[in-house]
Image (cartoon, helix red, strand yellow):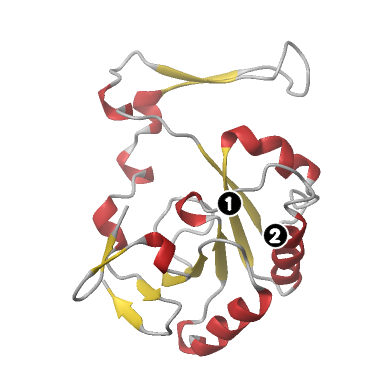
């Protein structure tokens, strides 16, 4: 998805960071946030946090725009080190991953941190059109494997407007591009 800046569309691969007020309805909702695209680099992140000191950044969102591409714990090692560093500094940290990678989170040693927010991305095209009777089932990998049971939620209930973030709510993002030019949408 391209993002609109003041005078041009910018491809997400050309954006390294966003500085914004977090719009997604998680525990970080409303927090001043640095959103990180792609592989995390500790020094770059620290530089941008210092550069935007006036924004009082208190939350970091890793893995935005499906940029978390690790499929093994070894490949995730650098991510874990950077995330843990910022958790030790009392930042709130979100890691957005595809739901198929939930086992990596469980193995990562990040889950016990109180300020760590695992954001499981579940892609459901046309969710709003599924109708009132459609449900989502949170299951286990097999019967009685790691969960105490299953949970079913009607999609209708999950689509509550109080939990909804419209695409236009991201309008105040400050895009920090690799060339260092910041652009406000």
Q: Name the residue under label 1.
A: 68
* Residues at circles 2 and 1 in contact by the CB criterion of under 8 Å: yes
Could you tell me which secondary element the residue under label 2 belongs to?
helix
Q: Where is residue 184 in the image (x, y as percent from the top left)?
A: 29, 76
Q: Position of residue 15 (x, y in %)?
A: 42, 68
- Relative side of 42 to 174, left or right: right
Q: Position of residue 179 (x, y in %)?
A: 42, 82
Above or below for 10 versus 167:
below
Q: Can residue 22 be seen in this view?
A: no
- The number of callouts visible is 2
Above or below for 15 versus 2:
below
Q: Residue at x 34, y 36 (%)?
A: 160
Q: Which of 153 and 49 is in front in this view?
A: 49
Could you tell me which secondary element the residue under label 1 belongs to?
loop
- Crowding at mark 1 (Cα within 10 Å: few <14, some 14-19, many 20+): many
Q: Which residue is drawn at 37% across and 16% down?
A: 134
The quarter holding residue 41 reads: bottom right
Q: Name the residue under label 2.
A: 79
Q: Which of 15 and 103 is in front in this view?
A: 15
- Relative side of 77 to 71, left or right: right
Instruction: List the single residue furthest toward the left.
Output: 7
- Relative side of 22 to 81, left or right: left
Q: Where is residue 86 in the image (x, y as percent from the top left)?
A: 69, 70
* The C terminus sits in image quarter: bottom left
């Amino acid at each position: 998805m391209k993002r609109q800046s003041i005078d041009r569309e910018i491809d997400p691969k050309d954006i390294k960071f966003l500085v914004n007020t977090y719009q997604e309805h998680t525990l970080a909702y409303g927090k001043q946030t640095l959103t990180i695209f792609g592989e995390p680099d500790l020094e770059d992140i620290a530089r941008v946090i210092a550069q935007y000191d006036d924004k009082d950044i208190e939350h970091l969102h890793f893995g935005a725009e499906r940029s978390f591409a690790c499929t093994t714990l070894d490949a995730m090692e650098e991510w874990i080190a950077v995330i843990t560093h910022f958790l030790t500094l009392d930042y709130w940290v979100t890691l957005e991953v595809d739901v198929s990678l939930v086992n990596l989170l469980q193995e990562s040693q990040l889950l016990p941190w109180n300020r760590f927010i695992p954001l499981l991305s579940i892609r459901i095209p046309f969710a709003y059109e599924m109708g009132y009777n459609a449900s989502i089932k949170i299951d286990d990998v097999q019967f009685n494997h790691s969960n105490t049971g299953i949970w079913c939620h009607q999609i209708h209930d999950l689509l509550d407007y109080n939990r909804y973030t419209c695409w236009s709510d991201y309008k105040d993002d400050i895009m920090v591009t690799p060339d260092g030019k910041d652009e406000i949408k």
